[in-house]
Image (cartoon, rainbow, N blue to C red):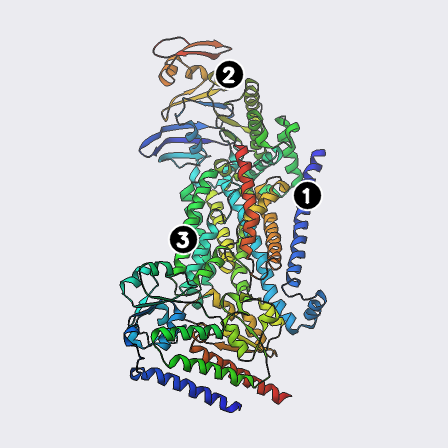
Amino acid sequence: MTHLSAKDVNLKRSGRNILKNISLSLGSGELVGLIGPNGAGKTTLLKVLLGLIEPTSGLVQLNNIPISKVSRKSVASHIGYLAQGSPCHWPLTVEKVVELGYLSRGKARNNDIASKLSLLNQAINKLGLSSLRHRLVPTLSGGERTLTMIARCLMGGSPLLLADEPITGLDPGHQVDVMSNFLDHISEINGVVAVLHDLNIAAQYCDRLILMDQGAIVSDGHPKDVLTSKNLIEVYGIVADISLKDGRPLVIGHRGRGGHDF
Amino acid sequence: MIEKDKNKSDEINYFILIAVLSGLVLILFTSSIFLGTTSISIKKSLSAVSALEGLYLTIILELRLPRAILALFMGAALGISGAALQGLLRNPLAEPGLIGVSGASALGSVIVFYTGLSVSYSFALPVGGMTGAALSILLLYFLAGKDPSILKLILAGVAINTLTGALTVLALNLSPNPYAAYEVFFWLLGSLENTSVNHVFLAAPCICVGLIILATTGRGLDALTLGEDVARSLGVGLRNLQARIILGTALCVGASVSVAGVVGFVGLIVPHLLRPAVGHSPGRLLIVSGLGGATLTLAADISVRFIATGQGLQLGVLTALLGAPFFILLVFKLREDD
Amino acid sequence: MRPNLALASKLILVSLFALFVSSNNFVLAKSEQKIPQRIVSTNLCVDQLVLSLANKEQILSVSYLSADKTISLFSERVEGLQKNRGWVEEIFMMRPDLVIVNEDSPRPSLRHLKKLGLNVLSLRTANNFSELKKNIKKVSRVVGDTGKGKLIISNIDSKLRLENGDDYSPLAAILLPRGMTAGEGSLINELVVSAGFKNLAHDLKIGRQARINLEEILIARPDFIITPETSTKFPSLAQSMLLHPVFEETRDKDYRWKHLEVPERAWLCGGLPNIYALDLLIKARLKFGRRVGQHD
């Protein structure tokens, strides 16, 4: 059971407040959507939660230990990370990239080649990548790349996964693919935090949404409590028609403030 | 279970590649001892070695063996440094010569040599080279940033090369040495001619340590393929990795240049040729590039003995002649990719 | 004949130096107004000739290299003279009545000097004795020397004649800084061959100046390895080759070769110092020859 929390986290960069008084708690088997306009500080927050960026003040704790005191290896065994755009600088095969996830398992790694191989096969099969196994990652489509990176995180076996815009730029088919993969493996992964831009997908798949604006958390809770007309006009500047479908909000946005439809 | 076999065959291919390259190194190393400007027949060489005496044995022990050992170590050092820097900067053009590391090593060595420091303390020479190398990598980070584009990297390299080249010539101009003008050639386009056992004792231990340090960075470099943040999220200590690569490269390149001058492009050609053979894995590229670098340098050093013997073609000239077309080819390739 | 050789050469040298010291008493030749009194020489080797042939009072300036005693025989004599670096402007401002330059040196520009209306004598680098003699005669003529040039020439000739009586010619490898050797067509080769050695460069068909490999030297088993004296004044890679440990190694073992060091100033330029170089080389050869004679 992994528990990640932030308390009163502030981050200042060259006089600007990038994160303001962020407090949150993650890790209890949920799929969390982190939403907010561009520049709200979502990516930065993920990096602070991973311990990649040191906050100016406040505390990030992994299982009640300050994350700055936890070794990188130990953090890796608890939290997986999917970077925006799934970078891959050399033309490695899907298999090789997925295998890299094994690094987060730490010391045990070289002990058992057979178990490593079976983990690899599991991860690849679960994401339906068997046919792409020997393809080079840079030649894949954006969706296939993201799936490869998710497989890589599965391979690592970290209970918590932080994903930065995993479905941005993907076609609807792949968007659904990625999101349902998160859901399918939530039992295994324990918790997923995903930065999302599509409010309807966020509402449909996530049990909890965190809405950020200008470095601060505006709202944190069930989608129907977060995606309110008030929040949407204040944060995104859009006037929205919000209807409920199966208890989850469905949002149709219009041009804000001026009141013009588009 | 086909997958399992495929995985296994990758493994087997890797070891076959290592075995083949090691074999080549062994053959070239032996040839380097038996082939020279003056032909000593194999029979004579063998009898000289077995009889443990004679002029031929002296020539082999004092002239050819040090030269072959240095070619081996220097080539391995340059090959592995090229592979490590390319992995660290995620850029196939990061070559010790191109980005100014070798030039800075030459400057460091020149300062130590011509101030007479190395006369009193011979080990000051490789230390000077290594200091120059380490400083230039730090300067490169400062100039080009952490994740440099090809353009930034090359521009930073041009800047460092120009600066260190000019300072090297200036240092030589200021020295009272009447041969300074000719010695510039040695430092800027290296040579292994007339190296002695002393050079081996100075450079080889440093290079050895550097090789070992760089050989351990494979996993980190593999992870770095996915970007610095992901690599750190996978448990890679980035600072530690960077420090090890800077130290290892400084030891390897600094020590090599301090005894043999700048031999360029080995770190470009070798990783470029071998990368596809190891599935582009930056980690696996390390050891094979070390072996490949040794192969290329030994072969080039044997060739210079037979090309234009009268004027003494310098090793650095030959590798630059071989390397420049590769560089052009790479630039074209990268342009297509963009 | 041999024992007298050393004595003879010493006498000649002493008499030559005496001549220089007493140059004040030297009576200048007939047309006094034509004899230059403000001579500027711009090249080390030209300096050496001018300093041996002209009176010091006639000389205004020599090249800065002539003050370096490792390469200049006259480093003491040039004290008090202006040192030039061969810049045309610098020379022009000295208002010389004669500028002597080396045509083979890039500086100063001969064309510019002539354009400025200066009186210029240009010499070519002497690569053998006959060229050297020509240069000596030329300089003698223009500086108004009546006897010193002839004396130097006759000294060189007599040295060369003395040498002719002996037929033992050991093999010598000449090793210069930067791993070079001096072959046919170079002054150093002329000196070494005239002193009765066989030059290894000749056997290897190496030209005037080219690289030589240490292996080639050792395999040839020379009787002598002739190098310039290494200077400890400054560290240089060029010289480090002369100190390669293989020499120490082979010297310790039973190889016959002897190391002979010649001061750079004795053979770098053609002129008076060559007599000293010849003397040194001949003495070493004869000493060695006698030793072999005893063995036989």
Task: Determine whether the residue tagged by mark 2 lies in a helix, strand or loop.
Answer: helix
Q: Could you tell me which residue is drawn at 37 percent across and 75 percent down?
A: C141
Quadrant in which the C terminus of chain A is drawn: top left
Crowding around mark 1 (Cα neighbors within 10 Å: few <14, some 14 to 19, many 20+) is few
| Separation of residues labelled 2 and 1 (CA atoms) | 48 Å
Relative to C178, residue B146 above or below: above
For mark 1, what is the residue?
A: B13
| Separation of residues labelled 2 and 3 (CA atoms) | 64 Å
Relative to C77, residue B137 above or below: above
**Residue A56 horizontal/vertical position (percent):** 35, 36
**Residue B235 horizontal/vertical position (percent):** 51, 40
Q: Which chain is mark 3 on? A: B
Q: Which chain is mark 1 on? A: B
Mark 1 is on which residue type? Asn
Instruction: Decide which of tag 3 and tag 1 comes sooner along the chain.
Output: 1
For mark 3, what is the residue?
A: B166
Task: Determine whether the residue tagged by mark 1 lies in a helix, strand or loop.
Answer: helix
Q: Could you tell me which residue is drawn at 53 percent across and 73 percent down?
A: C189
Mark 3 is on which residue type? Ala
For mark 2, what is the residue?
A: A204
Relative to A139, residue B197 above or below: below
